Image: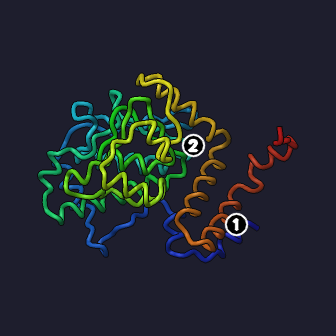
Amino acid sequence: MAKSLLKTSSLSGRTKLLHQTGLSLYSTSHGFYEEEVKKKLQQFPGGSIDLQKEDSGIGILTLNNPSKMNAFSGVMMLQLLEKVIELENWTEGKGLIVRGAKNTFSSGSDLNAVKSLGTPEDGMAVCMFMQNTLTRFMRLPIISVALVQGWALGGGAEFTTACDFRLMTPESKIRFVHKEMGIIPSWGGTTRLVEIIGSRQALKVLSGALKLDSKYALHIGMVEEVLQSSDETKSLEEAQEWLKQFIQGPPEVIRALKKSVCSGRELYLEEALQNERDLVGTVWGGPANLEAIAKKGKFIK
């Protein structure tokens, strides 16, 4: 019955974007030519984006360019897209931790690339490329958390907003420095920040280029929790334990939940409800559902 309902569902364009992986915000109809942008970004090497997938269903995505505080080179931007595509196809994945190498998150874009891509056309092209990538990242059917150690500056701060949750170590700081650079956030950071902390707080944070220490970030709702340790290894272990409480259960259920929340955030009410209905059809009567019913579990404790 559920399968027949899925076949007859009429999906809007927005709903189709959420149902289908690999679809981007921008295309040639918007003046975006991805292959041309990729060729330009390839000219700026340095660093890497590393992905470790564990049997627990937790992935660890590491921004690895420590000599430049994990600033994004052009090649790293390309590699981020590659890792997002890999994560889109990781059917056993349930959670993801994003972190920076050597106990700092990221200082944003590599200035060498910024200086060379100096025209408004270049800026808009990179903007569309990174908005495409981070929107696909945000829509991943896994629960993501940014582990902010050290500094998250500029584009690094923007990346944290693409994660479902944010955790900070006691001495870490987040700062949207764009105003000081004579620009505004270009990787989707403003739009996502407004959703996270509201328009008034977002305006303060952006126009004041405020340094958000862990205490203030927690106060305004930017982060979920301040971890106990600032040690690189121990804080990663804390983040893993924090994430585990939200990903207990089979992958198909966790992934359906994340997809349903994404539709609730991005779609109109009627479309979100229809999408929720379709997702129910993928898990109702499934192995996890039947096992729970067989156990006759009591959930009020």
Q: What's under tag 1, amino acid-wise?
A: Lys
Q: Residues within 10 Å of mark 1 (few under 14, many from 20)?
A: few
Quadrant showing the C terminus: top right
Percent of width and height locating residue 128:
30, 62
Q: What's under tag 2, amino acid-wise?
A: Lys
- CA separation in Å, label 1 and label 2: 24 Å
Q: Is residue 171 left or right of residue 275?
A: left
Q: Report the front residue among 263 and 83.
A: 263
* Quarter assignment of residue 47: top left
Percent of width and height locating residue 251:
62, 45
Vertical comparison of 85 with 32: above or below: above
Residue at 54 percent across and 52 percent down: it is: 141
Q: In this view, does 284 lie to the left or right of 194?
A: right
For label 1, the SS is helix
Residue 94 has which mark?
A: 2
Residue 84 has which mark?
A: none
Vertical comparison of 98 with 78: above or below: above
Q: How crowded is mark 2: few (under 14 residues within 10 Å), some or many (20 or more)?
A: many
Percent of width and height locating residue 134:
39, 54
* Quarter assignment of residue 146: top left
Q: Mark 1, mark 2: which one is toward the viewer?
A: 2
Residue at 85 percent across and 41 percent down: it is: 298
Q: Report the front residue among 104 and 226.
A: 226
Residue tagged 1: 3
Percent of width and height locating residue 239:
51, 32
